[in-house]
């Protein structure tokens, strides 16, 4: 916030528009060992990219939160932390934990409810990272996703997903993204996790720029075929 | 240009920084300061400032003052939005001038009834804005056809030819004691009372995702217009802020309106028009910078020609319940609606849902605003009602001290000023009545004050309020809850002291009796409230009232 000794200006000061970036990280039992280590490394490696983008553009201030989900979700970073201030605390896998995504979506939906984020905030960005198929009880995935989509900010959010391993690429992730033209980013091995997260962060940041041609950004950063016009990332000014 | 046409005005396609709203008309017109700045993000990507603003003082009955701002959409789909916003403000001035001229043909604007103003606004304003903007776009397109590349892009998206020109529009007209507002799309209007409380003069737009907006270019633009009519006699204002969304998106406070309203009321009480002319462009620049929203930002600030008189007028409008002020005025207009208590029948807010080009009268919605107490004053009170007939039977009296010195100077039968710039090509060189304003801004030496300068040396100047601030805070600088805590602490301390004294007296019978501690507590309490708003004596009423407002809004 700018509070220098500039001439008087009405109000409580100015600042950039917040861009809330929320990571939903799979901490099920299957993530133990090399995967969770690689994921922690990749997330920590992703932050400087976001911070660099924040420095290089003129509109947004990035705030990071994280949900660790397994059988139950929990906030790993509950309060928004400026990306330049974040010190990533490693995620820990839950022994024999399942991959229940619906309740994680619901937790995020609560955080995106009206009054919970600033009215002037840019569209939030949600990044779902998992190594397996959803194991939600019947109906729970749909309920959670409905809760997320029931929030205006959830509906408008840029939603991307990274699958660790080909087997993790599922219809559930496509439904989370909500746009068939946007692919799930697949890391075939742990070495690729960092690359995929960087790609995701670049996509999130570039597409968050006001006035950006999001389809063009998606084509470039996500490898979409030429001519593809994304739906969820479109930015019509006409309602 | 005839004598009845605009005599002063400023419109600008807003370059990097544009400043200076208008030459001040003699007399008591509302004073307009405009600033516009190119957004840092636009600068980085080579986009121009796509905002536009225009101001027109019309010589005619009611001394109409017209201000319009527009925000051309930044998305590449709206590749002519800079022209679209210019066309929008130009059309807005024409349409508003025609509206006021039409009103003047019926009667002196000050003598018009609410129903007459309401009907004119409802039936003419938004439809004309949409119709004329589309016609202006067609005219511009005829002169500047799409390139083959632009046309192919348009065809690929299936867009109508108006889409590239997409822009928002906010326009206000003050004529006599009527405030007429119309808005489509994002951006903010903030009406500020002399005590610093504020409200949205048009209903709050629906919450979109923060990046999309309603637009003049949408096929059903008429349905998206929000319109408000306010009687400034029953709801005196000291200032009115119009801003494109680059302003609100840069404000850290959420909601930002109460704080901005308080500060602007304070500024209006302590500074003259020259000061605002120098400051407003800087505000726009800061909001548009990379420290703010980074988006194009345009601010148009209308300030009452005599804020002190507005404050007096506001105090003369009875307000029976502070709670009404607190709840109604600081919320978006859409949250103010509801059945007003008895005595609130003089409705000052009209919201019009225009469901479509053919839907007008049957979709008019008029709601009582709890904060209004117009009819509880000199106006005969009537029952709260949403019936327009209940609100429009009375012709409002002319103000005793009108801000527009020219009101009444022209007979009501004087010819209405024709639309001033209807014939010109809006995208071409600006006409003589709409000087293009670019460059830095200060068109008069710093510190100089024009006629009617209120001057900082007056009793409302910031320097007269001492180091604790400009008179908005409680003298002790504490909230009521903190006051209570202090009183309790004092009571405890006094009780302990009394106990000690009692013990001492018991030990030393010759000592003098201790003072009654309860009285000290009571005096402390009285002292605390004595400087509060309840003690609003004539000399301190203004300050006390502002203190009350500040306190409440701070709590909110």
Image (cartoon, rainbow, N blue to C red):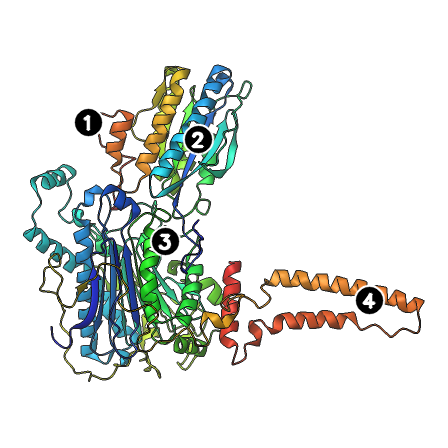
Q: In x, y percent, where is residue B333?
A: 38, 61
Point out the tag, 3 or 4, that comes first from the N-terminus.
3
Is disc 1 on the same chain as disc 3? no
Look at 16% across and 82% down and name the residue there: B414
For residue B244, the mark is none
Residue B188: image location, x then y, percent: 33, 57
* Chain to which the residue tagged by mark 3 belongs: B
Q: Chain of mark 4?
A: B
Question: Is the residue marked by circle 2 packed among few (<14), some (14-19), or many (20+) residues within 10 Å?
Answer: many
User: In the visual, does A10 lie left or right of B228?
Assistant: right
Nearer to me, B474 or B175: B474
Q: Position of residue A59 (x, y in %)?
A: 34, 44
* Residue B31 appears in view: yes
Q: Which residue is mark 3?
A: B248
**Distance between the alpha carbons at the discs numbered 2 and 1:** 29 Å
Furthest residue in direction front, as rendered? B445
- List the residue tagged with mark 4: B498
Closer to the N terminus: mark 2 or mark 1? 2
């Amino acid at each position: 916030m700018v509070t220098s000794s500039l001439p008087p200006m009405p109000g409580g000061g100015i600042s950039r528009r917040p861009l809330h970036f929320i990571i939903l990280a799979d901490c099920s039992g299957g993530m133990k060992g090399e995967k969770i280590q690689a994921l922690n490394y990749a997330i920590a490696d992703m932050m400087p990219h976001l911070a660099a983008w924040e420095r290089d553009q003129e509109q947004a201030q990035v705030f990071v939160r994280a949900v660790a989900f397994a059988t139950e979700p929990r906030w790993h970073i509950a309060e928004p932390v400026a990306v330049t201030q974040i010190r990533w605390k490693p995620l820990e896998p839950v022994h024999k934990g399942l991959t229940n995504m619906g309740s994680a979506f619901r937790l995020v939906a609560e955080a995106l409810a009206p009054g919970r984020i600033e009215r002037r905030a840019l569209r939030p960005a949600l990044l779902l990272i998992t190594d397996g198929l959803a194991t939600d009880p019947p109906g729970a995935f749909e309920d959670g996703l409905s809760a997320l989509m029931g929030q205006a900010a959830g509906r408008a959010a840029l939603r991307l997903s990274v699958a660790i391993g080909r087997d993790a690429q599922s219809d559930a992730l496509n439904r989370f993204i909500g746009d068939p033209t946007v692919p799930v980013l697949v890391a075939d091995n742990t070495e690729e996790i960092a690359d995929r997260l960087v790609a995701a962060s670049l996509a999130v940041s570039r597409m968050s720029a006001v006035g950006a041609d999001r389809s063009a950004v998606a084509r470039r950063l996500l490898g979409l075929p030429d001519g593809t016009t994304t739906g969820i990332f479109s930015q019509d000014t006409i309602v | 240009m005839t004598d009845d046409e605009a005599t002063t005005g400023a419109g600008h396609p807003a370059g990097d920084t544009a400043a200076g709203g208008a030459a001040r008309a003699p007399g008591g017109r509302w004073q307009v300061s405009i600033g516009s700045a190119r957004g840092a993000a636009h600068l980085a990507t080579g986009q121009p400032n796509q905002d536009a603003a225009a101001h027109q003082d019309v010589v005619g009955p009611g001394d109409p003052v017209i201000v319009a701002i527009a925000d051309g959409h930044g998305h590449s789909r709206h590749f002519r939005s800079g022209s679209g916003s210019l066309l929008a403000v130009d059309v807005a001035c024409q349409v508003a001038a025609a509206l006021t001229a039409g009103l003047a043909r019926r009667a002196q604007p000050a003598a018009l009834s609410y129903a007459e103003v309401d009907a004119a606004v409802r039936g003419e304003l938004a439809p004309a804005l949409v119709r004329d903007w589309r016609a202006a776009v067609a005219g511009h397109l005829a002169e500047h056809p799409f390139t083959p590349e632009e046309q192919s892009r348009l065809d690929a998206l299936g867009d109508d030819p108006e889409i590239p020109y997409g822009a928002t529009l906010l326009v206000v007209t003050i004529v006599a004691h009527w405030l007429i507002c119309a808005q489509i799309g994002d951006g903010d209007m903030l009406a500020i009372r002399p005590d610093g409380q504020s409200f949205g003069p048009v209903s709050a737009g629906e919450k979109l995702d923060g990046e999309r907006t309603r637009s003049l270019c949408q096929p059903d633009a008429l349905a998206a217009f929000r319109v408000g009519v306010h009687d400034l006699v029953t709801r005196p204002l000291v200032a009115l802020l119009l801003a494109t969304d680059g302003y609100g998106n840069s404000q850290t406070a959420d909601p930002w309106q109460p704080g901005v309203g308080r500060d602007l009321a304070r500024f209006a009480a302590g500074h003259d028009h020259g000061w605002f002319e120098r400051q407003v462009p800087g505000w726009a620049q800061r909001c548009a910078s990379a420290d703010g929203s980074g988006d194009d930002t345009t601010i148009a600030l209308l300030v009452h020609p005599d804020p002190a008189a507005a404050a007096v007028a506001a105090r003369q409008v009875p307000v029976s319940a502070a709670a009404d002020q607190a709840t109604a005025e600081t919320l978006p207009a859409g949250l103010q609606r509801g059945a007003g208590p008895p005595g609130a029948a003089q409705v000052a807010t009209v919201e019009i849902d225009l469901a479509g080009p053919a839907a007008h009268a049957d979709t008019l919605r008029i709601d009582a605003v709890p904060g209004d107490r117009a009819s509880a004053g000199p106006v005969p009170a009537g029952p709260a009602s949403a019936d327009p007939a209940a609100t429009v039977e009375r012709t409002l009296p002319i103000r005793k001290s009108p801000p527009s010195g020219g009101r009444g100077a022209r007979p009501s039968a004087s010819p209405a000023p024709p639309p001033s710039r209807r014939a010109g090509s809006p995208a071409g060189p600006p006409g003589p009545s709409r000087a293009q304003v670019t460059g830095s801004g200060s068109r008069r030496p710093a510190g100089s004050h024009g006629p009617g300068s209120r001057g900082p040396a007056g009793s409302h100047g910031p320097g007269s309020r001492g180091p604790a601030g400009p008179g908005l805070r409680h003298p002790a600088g504490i909230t009521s809850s903190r006051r209570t805590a202090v009183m309790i602490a004092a009571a405890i301390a006094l009780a302990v002291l009394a106990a000690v004294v009692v013990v001492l007296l018991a030990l030393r019978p010759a000592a003098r009796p201790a003072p009654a501690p309860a009285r000290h507590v009571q005096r402390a309490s009285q002292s605390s409230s004595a400087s509060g708003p309840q003690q609003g004596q004539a000399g301190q009423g203004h300050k006390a009232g502002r203190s009350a407002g500040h306190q409440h809004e701070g709590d909110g």
